[in-house]
């Protein structure tokens, strides 16, 4: 890999947004020989984001400061991402990562993976490293199954264990233009949910294929194809999610779906007024609720500020 080294006197700050995602579909195809599960999932970034600021350090180290102090630590994906890229490019320049956390943690929204992808992109831009998106994708795949998706975001079909990403043309239905995300007051381990899966949770990937075909044709996906192979297991294990789902339905939501391994549930609306009404009802019942929409990030979301 041909890499331009950052100048030793480089100073500045690089701000970048790290967007959350939802899963329109999540087909679990079966267990692979390496222990992972084969997936086919359609994912979309939404306008709920963490903000990261990266700046150079004189010391040869990576430091993280987060608004959620419990997330500071050597095993944070952002720290691991910075270290892997520095090692790949033989860089000794240190980096400070400041993370303003808004995306709920362990919520099925991909916040940690998105933060890691944002760090890779920000370091590449800030130090003008001659690494390709494919190079970053290799590093991202080591970090986690969702990280490669967040290097581009938008709408995509993700396969393999999630790391094989096929970007799709923007095709979000007008009938789904506003989204309500409800995060029950629990956290769920993705690994724990996958460990509980059995053959009756598996599908052949046709849900994802039909949703892709519909979106690329400008059509609204069929309700039965908005399938999440983890949902049954999550509902069986977590009564809090069952209760939250029932509350959403009673608040006037016609269809509720689980994002990733949860516990976050989402619903879509064709108009803002209806979405706001439902949001207020759910907030009045004590739930953590976000009103958002689909978003297609661009490199323009990186703002490099030099002194």
Image (spheres, rainbow, N blue to C red):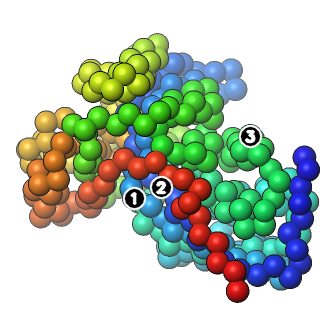
List the single residue furthest toward the bottom: 307
Q: Residues within 10 Å of mark 2 (few under 14, many from 20)?
A: many
Q: Mark 3 or mark 1, which is nearer the start of the sequence?
A: 1
Q: Is residue 143 above or below residue 156?
A: below
- Tell us which disc is closer to us: 1 or 3: 3
Taking depth in this image into account, of 232 and 58 the one nearest to the observer is: 58
Q: Position of residue 177 (x, y in %)?
A: 26, 44
Q: Residues within 10 Å of mark 3 (few under 14, many from 20)?
A: few
Marks 2/1 in contact by CB < 8 Å: the verdict is: yes
Cα–Cα span, label 2 and label 1 = 6 Å
The residue singled out by tag 1 in the image is 48
The residue singled out by tag 2 in the image is 19
Cα–Cα span, label 1 and label 3 = 26 Å
Q: Position of residue 245 (x, y in %)?
A: 20, 43
Look at the numbered disc 1 and give the secondary structure of its residue.
strand
Look at the numbered disc 2 and give the secondary structure of its residue.
strand
Marks 2/3 in contact by CB < 8 Å: the verdict is: no
């Amino acid at each position: 890999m041909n890499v331009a080294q950052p100048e030793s006197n480089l100073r500045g700050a690089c701000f970048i947004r790290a967007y959350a995602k939802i899963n329109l579909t999540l087909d679990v195809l079966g267990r692979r020989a390496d222990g992972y599960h084969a997936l086919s999932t359609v994912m979309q970034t939404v306008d709920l984001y963490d903000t990261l600021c990266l700046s150079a350090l004189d010391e040869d180290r990576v430091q993280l400061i987060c608004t959620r102090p419990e997330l500071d630590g050597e095993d944070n994906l952002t720290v691991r991402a910075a270290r892997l890229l520095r090692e790949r490019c033989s860089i000794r320049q240190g980096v400070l990562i400041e993370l303003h956390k808004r995306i709920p943690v362990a919520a099925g929204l991909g916040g940690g993976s998105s933060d890691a992808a944002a760090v890779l992109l920000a370091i590449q831009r800030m130090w003008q490293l001659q690494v390709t998106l494919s190079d970053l994708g290799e590093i991202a795949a080591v970090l986690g199954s969702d990280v490669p998706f967040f290097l581009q975001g938008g709408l995509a079909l993700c396969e393999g264990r999630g790391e094989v990403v096929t970007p799709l043309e923007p095709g979000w239905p007008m009938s789904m233009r506003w989204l309500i995300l409800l995060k029950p007051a629990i956290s769920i381990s993705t690994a724990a949910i996958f460990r509980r899966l059995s053959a009756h949770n598996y599908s052949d990937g046709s849900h994802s294929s039909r949703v892709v075909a519909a979106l690329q044709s400008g059509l609204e996906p069929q309700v039965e194809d908005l399938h999440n192979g983890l949902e049954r297991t999550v509902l069986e294990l977590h009564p809090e999610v069952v209760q939250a789902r029932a509350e959403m339905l009673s608040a006037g939501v016609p269809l509720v779906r689980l994002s990733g391994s949860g516990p976050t549930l989402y619903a879509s609306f064709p108009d803002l007024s209806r979405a706001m009404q439902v949001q207020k009802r759910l907030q009045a019942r004590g739930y953590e609720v976000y009103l958002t929409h689909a978003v297609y990030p661009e490199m323009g979301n990186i703002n490099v500020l030099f002194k």
